[in-house]
Image (cartoon, rainbow, N blue to C red):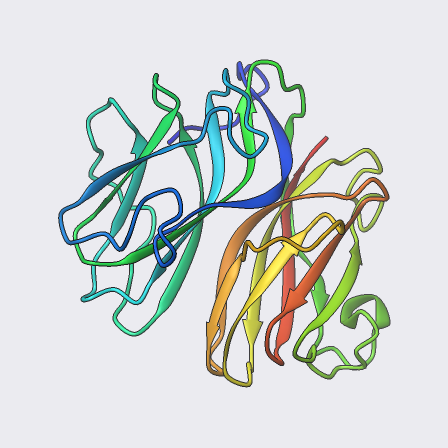
């Protein structure tokens, strides 16, 4: 879908996560998509994305498909690529984060080769008016609630998992090499040892959104990339629907 470079025409602007589509309730994309369907979603001028944005950063979640398959997100008005954005699996809820160019009419299209419900959360956008540039980092572990010895790693959990309904605040800007002027981070969020099915939400510590970043079904480890805007004090917040361990690896930031 693209690349980052110092000469890139567009910069990044992070947003408070906002759910703009959920076929389970008929939001944005209508009802459940049948196999072979393509539907469009207006994103320009929505959820804080300006009309002239070039691309949108979204978290796409595929929910309980009829069979194993794939979903492709791409700019409407262009030829659908052979690439996939998320791969649904029977009996599972699977998310993935993607930066998707916006079509000339302000829309993004979604194609699925299986019957599936989709949820779409917007977390940011790329535009020529944005001047935040990306710095890639050698990945490093910032949070691991399994670590019983280091408070800076376990966020005060003492090595125990986060409880159901917990919200924890994670310092980011000015921490472990992340610059003090960072405005958003790119991370890998992992969960393991969950006590049932649930989800994880990340946001810039204002009102918790309906959006989710990771969906869990049992104790097996699950992971997803996330682009998260920082709060004015340089933090992000984590919410866990059910008891689980959380691991965060930082892979870059925008500043």
Rendered residue at 18%/57% (across/down):
114
Q: How many marks?
A: 0
**Residue 224 image offset from top left, x and y in percent:** 49, 57
Task: Write the residue at 68% across / 74% down.
Answer: 165
Is 75 rendered above or below residue 111? above
* Apparent side of residue 216 relative to residue 137 in the rendered image (left or right): left
Frontmost residue, 223 versus 73 = 73
Q: Nearer the viewer, residue 156 or 123?
A: 123
Report whether residue 98 is seen: yes
Asked if residue 192 lies left or right of residue 161, the reply is left
The residue at the point 54 percent across, 57 percent down is: 212
- Residue situated furthest front in the rendering: 26
- On screen, 226 above or below 6? below
* Residue 135 visible within the image: no
Image location of residue 100, percent across then percent down: 41, 33
Q: Is residue 18 above or below residue 94?
A: above
Of 114 and 224, nearer the camera is: 114
Screen quadrant of the N terminus: top left
197 with respect to 158 (left or right): left
Q: Residue at x 84, y 38 (%)?
A: 180
The quadrant holding residue 233 is: top right
State the quadrant of the C terminus: top right
């Amino acid at each position: 879908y693209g690349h980052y470079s110092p000469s890139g025409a567009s910069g990044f602007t992070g947003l408070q996560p906002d759910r703009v589509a959920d076929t389970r309730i008929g939001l944005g994309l209508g009802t459940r998509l049948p196999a072979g369907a393509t539907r469009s979603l207006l994103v320009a001028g929505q959820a804080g994305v300006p009309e002239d944005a070039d691309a949108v950063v979204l978290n796409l979640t595929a929910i309980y498909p009829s069979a194993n398959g794939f979903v492709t997100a791409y700019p409407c008005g262009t030829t659908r690529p052979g690439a996939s954005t998320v791969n649904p699996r029977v009996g599972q809820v699977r998310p993935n984060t993607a930066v998707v160019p916006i079509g000339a009419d302000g829309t993004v299209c979604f194609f699925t080769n299986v019957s599936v419900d989709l949820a779409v959360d917007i977390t940011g956008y790329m535009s020529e008016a944005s001047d935040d540039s990306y710095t890639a980092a050698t990945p490093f572990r910032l949070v691991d609630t399994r670590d019983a010895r280091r408070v800076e790693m376990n966020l005060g959990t003492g090595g125990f998992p986060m409880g159901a309904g917990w919200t924890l605040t994670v310092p980011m800007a000015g921490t472990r090499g992340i610059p003090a002027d960072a405005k958003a981070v790119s991370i890998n969020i992992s969960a393991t040892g969950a006590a049932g099915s649930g989800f994880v939400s990340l946001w810039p510590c204002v009102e918790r959104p309906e959006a989710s970043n990771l969906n869990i079904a049992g104790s097996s480890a699950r992971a997803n990339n996330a682009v998260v805007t920082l709060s004015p004090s340089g933090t992000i917040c984590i919410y866990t629907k059910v008891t689980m361990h959380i691991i965060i690896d930082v892979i870059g930031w925008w500043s």
